[in-house]
Image (cartoon, rainbow, N blue to C red):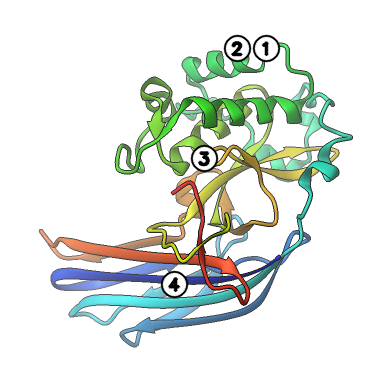
Amino acid sequence: MILDIRHHTSCRYDRAVSNARLELRLSPPDGEDQKLLDRSFRFTPDASVVTDRDTWGNTVEKICLPDGSDAWSFDLRMTVQTFRTDPFAEYCKWNFLPAPSAPGGWPREVRTYLASPDDPWDSDPAIRSWARSTVDGVLGAFRQVQAMMEHIHRNFRFVPGSTDNQTSPATLLARKQGVCQDFSNLLICAARSIGIPARYVSGYVYTGKDSETAATNHAWVECFFPEIGWAGFDPANGAIVSDAHVRLAHGARFADANPLNGVFTGRGVNQQVRTAIQVGKAGRGAGRGAGY
């Protein structure tokens, strides 16, 4: 599938600020499942833009605004080709295999995505108990993650504004409402609690609804299986990640893959950020990704 993506974000401060810095993770990496065909990026006002890579290998555009700025905006246009047309065909012969029983059974580069005993989210007993009860009787590591994803999709309500970046998976588990970011955080911790490496992914998703606009990026989870590699699970939509998804960045947590992060100096300054995202098949206009 070839997808056209249009992304506009604007920000206005109620008075001028200084030392304003932005980090954008909005460059889709090329891989076996996707290829960036075209990209144009326009930022206002004129500012210093430096392209770098972060610890996780994501492309980061670092922008320094002129002191005294009271607003900024950008327009991003991309065309991306995606190739994962039938993920079930790729995974079906492996989905009954168990996960390695010891951390040493995983490749070294994915061990950082296993549960950390020092991370309170990873070590929460409520999440561990929920994960084990949800996968009870389910054979195979892949099918266990799929079962947890489907449980979240069926039993948790999508309610924008009901959570924020600091909402813990345990809080989501108790309230059973949130957004794609929260659902992904819960699935990551749950997968790790049963010994499966999991990471946070930010990106875009297309569901075929033309001429609609989303107000934020999408998020999902990738889990690693020795026979498969990284496979994506979208709990907000209850779907295995396919050619409708465009990956931007990944990391252990949301902060590592945050598409847009910024800081500035200015006491008591308020800001208003607006975003409009459209995703559509090339040549057919734009459609909105679900799960926002």
Q: Evaluate if marks 4 and 3 touch, with contact meaning CB atoms under 8 Å apart.
A: no
> Does residue 103 show up?
no
Q: Say which element carries label 3.
A: loop
Q: Nearer the viewer, residue 187 or 156?
A: 156
Q: Residue at x 20, y 63 (%)?
A: 271
Above or below for 219 versus 141: below
Spatial distance from mark 3 to mark 1, Cα to Cα?
A: 22 Å
Q: Residue at x 63, y 74 (%)?
A: 282
The reply, left or right, for residue 61 in relation to residue 20 is right
Q: Nearer the viewer, residue 23 or 170?
A: 170
Q: Determine which of the numbered discs, if any, sits on residue 147 in the image.
A: none
Amino acid under disc 2: Ser
Q: Residue at x 65, y 70 (%)?
A: 80
**Please, which residue is most extreme toward the right here?**
93
Amino acid under disc 1: Asp
Q: Determine which of the numbered discs, if any, sits on residue 133 in the image.
A: 2
Spatial distance from mark 4 to mark 3, Cα to Cα?
A: 30 Å
Amino acid under disc 3: Ala
Q: Nearer the viewer, mark 4 or mark 3?
A: 3
Q: Position of residue 100 (x, y in %)?
A: 80, 26
**Mark 4 highlights which residue?**
62
Q: Where on the picture, by quarter, is residue 208? A: bottom right
Q: Rate crowding at label 4 as few (under 14), some (14 to 19) or many (20 or more) other CA atoms within 10 Å.
A: some
Q: Evaluate if marks 1 and 2 touch, with contact meaning CB atoms under 8 Å apart.
A: yes
**Mark 3 highlights which residue?**
236
